[in-house]
Amino acid sequence: MKPYFEEDGITIYLGDCREVLPQLEVNSIDMILTDPPYDRDSVWIYGEIAKHGRELLKEKAFCYAYCGADSLPEVVAIMKPHLYWFWLFTIAHNGAHPRVWNKCLMVAEKPVLAWTNGIVSQNDLEWICTDWVSENGDKLYHEWGQNIGFALEHIQKRTKESALILDPCSGGGTTLRAAKDLGRRAIGIEIEEKYCEIAAKRLSQKVFKF
């Protein structure tokens, strides 16, 4: 399996996560943090992430998945057989409110599901100050891109330096960039080559210390 990009501990694979995930090393991942497509036709991706996450994640490691509220019941149902439920985080849109036309709603926030590979006790955790944050999306690298702030906080609190972070739907590379900035290693999988190229250029920029 040849990487599309590999530099300073960050690797990007161009391909379908269904084909790439089974080739990764079992019990090697310290965190999954990903933002798959939200439409109902893409719910199967969450199942692949959870199923393979159970094998790839180390014991008590976290799996974070951004999700659309409209498909939340289906996403929870498809992930629940494989991982342990931890929490529901909320990111409020600081600015424009996307429209969900079939529900006649202007949406002000998005959920982020948090799961673990095994039961996590209080002694395993650092405090997260709130489960609700407000931040702008970042559309510079992807039309549906997220702000890097949430990824930075949770990677820092849930993993140690040199940990290995996995993003099976890496898009413009937000999770990968956050991992690099925090001194972590990372693997990204992206099905569209144009976003692999965008992420590769983004990752070649200078690291900022946090």
Image: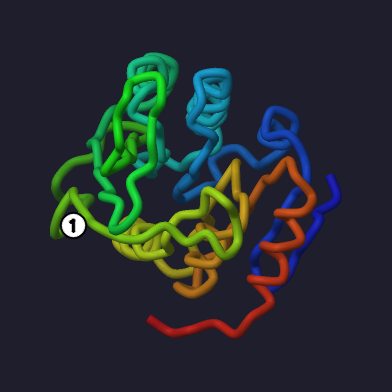
Residue 116 in percent (x, y) is at: 34, 36
Q: Which residue sits at x=65%, y=64%? A: 10
- Residue 174 in sight: yes
How many marks the image carries: the answer is 1
What is the quadrant of residue 113 in the picture?
top left
Q: Is 132 above or below relative to 42?
A: below
Q: Which residue is mark 1?
A: 128
Q: Is 11 above or below relative to 99?
A: below
Left or right: where 208 falls relative to 9: left
Q: Which residue sits at x=48%, y=31%? A: 38
Residue 135 in percent (x, y) is at: 30, 60
Q: Which residue sits at x=84%, y=45%? A: 1
Indicate the amino acid at tag 1.
Answer: Ile
Q: Please rate how many residues cluster around mark 1, counting C-alpha atoms within 10 Å: few if below 14, some from 14 to 19, many from 20.
A: few
Q: Which residue sits at x=56%, y=47%? A: 167
Mark 1 secondary-structure assignment: loop
The outermost residue toward the right is 2
Q: Is 114 above or below relative to 146?
A: above
Q: Which residue is nearer to you in this view: 39 or 8? A: 39
Q: Quadrant of the C terminus?
A: bottom left
Q: Which residue is nearer to you in this view: 24 or 108? A: 108
